[in-house]
Amino acid sequence: MNRSRFQVRILTGALLSALLRVQPIAAQVVPDTTLPVGERSQVTGNPNVQIDGGARRGGNLFHSFSQFSVPTGGSAYFNNAADVQNIFSRITGGAVSNIDGVIRANGTANLFLLNPNGILFGPNASLNIGGSFVATSANSINFADNFQYSATNPQTMLLLTVSVPVGLQMGATPGPIVVQGNGYNLSVSVAILSPTARGNSTAGLQVPAGRTLALIGGNIDIEGGTLTAEQGQIELGSVRSGQVSFSDSFALSYPGIQNFGNIRLSRQALADASGGGSIQVQGNQVSLADGSIMLIQNQGIQAGGSLRVNAFQSLEMSGISPDGGTYGGLIGETVGVGRGADITVSTQQLIAQRGAGTLTRSYSSGDAGNIAVNASDFIQLIGRSLTNPRLASVIGSGAFNSGDGGAVTVSTGQLSLLRGANLSTSTFGNGNAGNVTVNATRAVEIIGVSEFIAQSAINSNSNTAGVGNAGAVTINTARLVLQNGGTANSSTLGSGNGGSVTVNASKFVEISGTVPNSRLFSYVGSAAPIVAESTRRVFQLPDKTSGNAGSVTINTPHLSISDGANATVSSEGTGNSGTLRVNANLIVVDKGSAITAATASGEGGNVNLNVRDLLLLRNNSQITTSAGGSGNGGNIKIDARSIVAVPNENSDIRANSVNARGGNISINASGIFGIQPRPQDTPLSDITATGASSAQGGTVQLNIDRLDPTSGLAELPTTIVDSSRLIAQSCPVNPSSSFVISGRGGLPPTPDQELDDDADWQDRRRLTVTQQPGVRREGTDIRRRGDVPNLTGEASDKTQNHSTPYTPVVEATGWQRTPAGEIILVANTSNSAVQNSLNYPNTCQRR
């Protein structure tokens, strides 16, 4: 994201807000003359203004003003008939509307306030109406019969409509809408074990239950203001140009609009649609700062609503409240039987930092809502609150009673969790935690810890003495990087079971590093650990976990685990460990790292490694399935082309049990180098399966060549080869050919023999080059100019212009010993002379 552009736009919006704030607020509700005579608005009183008259058409009442502002402590009262359904008020002058008092209307009429130049609601502004309220800086209101009630083209209108409104026509430069206030009156538990206490404040802009509060304009800036629509809808839309549509229930849509403005909530601003309501936010850049919150809390049996943020370019959430008491973000809760609200975010870039979050939670029998985040470019969750380390930048869902937690699904180009940030689901009761699914086309990086040593993590946890289970964690990406304490895990701290963890990385998985001055390290795993006593007291956890750890599966071409990191399944309580499976082309475990399945008292877990090419162990690294207590050691199964370790680096493959039977190790490989089976651990690189005693040792089975004895033997052919067909006839060899047999000085016959320095036999005779047409001899250089030269054993080096008869090469038929003791192969042993000629069969032709 272009952060500088983002900051400039935010500053621009703040400047516009500041310009609105300095406008003097006076009692200025002034009618214009654009409505028909006798139907114009009538205004009396100051500062409490009563508005009568207007043009009535069926259930619609039209008002038109050149100015409309309400001072602090004042009011504007629309004295409409009780059966009026909609009040349309337009401001046709060039001034911004400053509202710092009360706007009232009779009955249940919906009120539209239309000022293209912008509207400022001060900290004392409030609503006392019976219907929905729409404040907009659009140019006109569109009706179903194509009539437009325009503030920028306010000619006298004799034919007003009885039709229903269907949308707003935005101009090219709509004015901003600003809502000021002193911040919300919420009590948010930083321990997250209790729901948000909303209080009974009536400050800010509030509509009756089931109604809609909509702010549609240029930039929308909520500066400590509060917006409340109990069981209703809150609509925030920042649009540069185009037509905004809405239904009969004022649910807004933005078909075909490409140019959006910015929306900012700051200074503990609040948008609250609790009671099963809905919130929709539509803008280009949307930001929540200083602990600002969008909240939907379901308090009864009604169905959960929805919280939807569509930020065309970016959504940024930052910080907690200035006093450090609460955090900011998007929150959906249920404290009743009904289901909690779902949260949906659609943007290009999402940034949450300093304790901001997107959360759904259940504190009752109702289930928490789901979270779906789609950020096409990237998601960054950064850090925790500096004043309260329990507040992480997070996207997550939790269950604190019998209801289940919601599912969390994230789709993005790149996901980054940094300095203690979390993407998680959890249960603290009898309900189950939801699943976590990450789809990141480019990369997932989980790096580091916070200032208070809290790890960055993607996880699903069961943090309860109840029976709630953790959810499954699935990560689909090209590259997964966990460094310096980053984790991807599922765990249980009580009687519930841990969930499974599945990683599908099409490029590589890198797990590396530890946290200095701590026992923390980077890992992918599922665990049932024992936590500190202080934590057990807070969450009422048992002294020992009884739940089982889940299984872990990693599918990737390249898995690298280094610098003390782990891939692990483990149980420190009475439960069992899960199974750890890795399918990879290459696995490298280095510098004190490990692939482990361990239990304290339950049955040891299993490790299955399917490695297409190489498994490499270096520098005191381990592949282990260990069991303490009465549990048997787990099993290790490795299928690899090659397994390599350095003998004196103490890298081990172990399936040991302290008090019971050792596990089983089965290895199928083409080659195993630098590591070998031994009856017990040594300082060398070992393969062991020890038990409580020698009689309880496990088994180690090595299948080095991957031969399958059950596959049978290949049958030999029954037809014997006719050797006579393989013997050459007694024809002369072409003079330009050669037959060479090397002596004993070549390569040794086996790799474990040293090279032999015996010299080869060489024929040192000088070669006579018989000149062929097109061949030139220059010194010892022979250059071809056409035909191949004829090389013979003649001593003469005279240049010939014609071919010289050659001595044919024939087969040796015997041997002779010379007086000097030399052995000479001869062609005929019938007499002592060596035959230099041979009669040829008629079938052969001499060349």
Image (cartoon, rainbow, N blue to C red):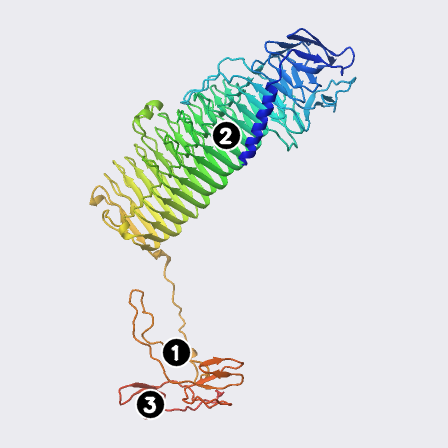
Q: Residues within 10 Å of mark 1 (few under 14, many from 20)?
A: few
Instruction: Label 1, secondary structure: give it.
Output: loop
Mark yes or no: residue 232 visible: no
Q: CA distance from mark 2 to mark 3?
A: 99 Å
Q: Which three-letter amino acid code belongs to the residue tagged 3?
A: Thr
SS at circle 3: loop
Q: Which comes sooner in the sequence, label 2 or label 3?
A: 2
Q: Which amino acid does the dot numbered 1 rest on?
A: Val
Task: Please name the residue shown 35% across and 29% down the image.
Answer: 493
Q: Is residue 842 visible?
A: yes
Q: Residues within 10 Å of mark 2 (few under 14, many from 20)?
A: many
The answer to whether marks 3 and 1 mark residues whose Cβ atoms lie closer than 8 Å is no
Whether residue 192 sits left or right of residue 108 in the image: it is left
Of tags 2 and 3, which is closer to the observer?
Answer: 2
The residue positioned 50% from the left and 32% from the top of the image is: 351
Query: What amino acid type should be assigned to the residue bearing mark 2?
Result: Ile
- In the image, is residue 486 above or below residue 317? below
Q: Residue furthest top?
A: 45
| Residue 332 rendering spot, x and y as whole percentages | 50, 24
Residue 799 badge:
none
**Residue beneath label 1, please?**
740
Disc 1 to disc 2: CB gap under 8 Å: no
Residue highlighted by disc 3: 829
Give residue 404's position: percent from left, percent from top: 44, 26
- Residue holding disc 2: 371
The x, y position of residue 742, in whole percent, is 35, 76
